[in-house]
Amino acid sequence: MDITRMPDPLRRAVHQLVCEAVEKCQEVLRYTEPDQAHSWERMTLYRTTDASDTLDKAALLIAAYCQRTGMAMGPLASYLQTGQQRSRAAGPGNAERAHLAGLLGERAPEAGGDSARYGWGQRTAEHAREAEDDPQELFTAAVLHGLTARLCDDVDALDHYLPPHVAELARKVAGVLEMPRPARVTVRPRRRRAVRL
């Protein structure tokens, strides 16, 4: 089997798309904060779908390359996990409504309910009550907020919209990140060698 690494132009395009998706994920978290009560529904939906679409672009770009290099549609469809994809155009279905009912502590929907998703919603709600600040979730949020604050050069803004413990961790993340600066190249004059005749 011939193993080749991802071509650099494709790698750079994928990196760019992933960075865009991460930025949108940070905005999703931002719009869940209490000071965004006036626009959270609209903006969280915009940004989650933007992130999803951006990652879809990355997946399909990689898939196009795999197809171009001879990968058959069977394995390609398997790697793309096409069987689990559901179109947003159909809107929320029974599974999403059952999941939401479990999250909100409501009774399980009787008609067409999805008991597995309902149970998942219940477990998620119980976990949220037990530990409001899961260390992994807290760290992920702080990294996303800290990175964005550093890129926007607005670290002080973190204190205005995040809970104090998240803002503190995000400040630490931003503090260790340096803005990329162009490399400085110093050109030193060459010494001339004496030529013997």
Image: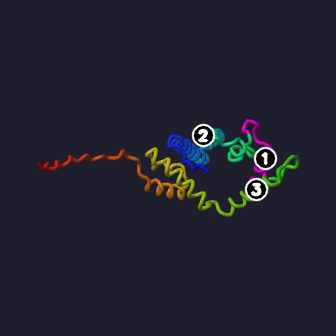
In the rendered structure, which segment of residues is drawn in magenta?
87-104
99 within the magenta span: yes
In this view, which residue lies farthest toward the bottom? 130
Q: Can residue 138 be spotted in the picture?
A: yes
Residue type, numbered disc 3: Trp
Left or right side of 131 for 99: right
In the rendering, at what x and y percent does residue 112 appear?
Answer: 86, 46
In the rendering, at what x and y percent does residue 114 appear?
Answer: 82, 50
- Between marks 1 and 2, how big is the CA–CA gap? 37 Å
Considering the numbered disc 3 on the image, is that residue within a helix, a strand or a loop? helix
Foreground residue among 82 and 96: 82
Q: Which residue is mark 3?
A: 120
Q: Which residue is mark 1?
A: 97
Residue drawn at 69 percent across, 61 percent down: 127
Q: Nearer the viewer, mark 1 or mark 2?
A: 2
Q: Which residue is mark 2?
A: 65
Foreground residue among 67 and 171: 67
Majority secondary structure of magenta residues: helix
